[in-house]
Image (tube, helix red, strand yellow):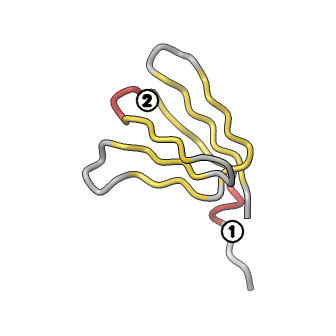
Amino acid sequence: MQYWVKVVFTDNQELMVNDALRHTISDDMEILEIDTPKEVIIIPLKQLKYFSCDAVVFSHKK
């Protein structure tokens, strides 16, 4: 399943990833990792203002 993730940095620049397969925060709460079919994006959380994702990742299949 692919979904979108929007990242807004502390300097108000934005990154929109439209084909994310997974996004996770490291155990030490320092890194956001976004995996796509072509690349892995690693962003230090100190550089983020906020991030949001498509609600489809929270849906449950019956």
Task: Point out the residue furthest to the top here.
Answer: 11
Report, in whole angstroms, how far the alpha carbon at label 2 lies from the one at label 1.
26 Å
Q: Residue at x 63, y 36 (%)?
A: 6
Location of residue 47 (image quadrant): top left
In-front residue for pair 62/13: 13
User: Viewed as shown, does residue 46 lie left or right of 24?
Assistant: left
Residue 59 appears at what percent x and percent y?
68, 68
Numbered tag placed on residue 27 in the rendering: none
Q: Residue at x 67, y 40 (%)?
A: 17
User: Which residue extends farthest front?
Assistant: 38
The vertical placement of 43 against 39, above or below, is above
What secondary structure is marked by label 2? strand
User: Callout 2 environment at 10 Å: few (<14), some (14 to 19), or many (20+)?
Assistant: some
Q: Position of residue 16 (x, y in %)?
A: 67, 33
Q: What's the residue type where badge 2 is placed?
A: Leu
**What residue sits 74% from the left and 86% below the top?**
62
**Among all residues in the image, which is located at the extreme left?**
28
Q: Quadrant of residue 61?
A: bottom right
* Mark earlier in primary sequence (2, 1): 2
Residue marked by disc 1: 59
Q: Amino acid at mark 1?
A: Ser
x and y percent of residue 55 in the render?
A: 68, 55
Residue 7 in the image, given as x and y percentages of width and height: 56, 33
Residue 48 bears which disc, if any? 2
Q: Is residue 40 left or right of residue 32?
A: right
Q: Is residue 26 above or below residue 58?
A: above
Q: How many marks?
A: 2
Q: Is residue 29 left or right of residue 8?
A: left
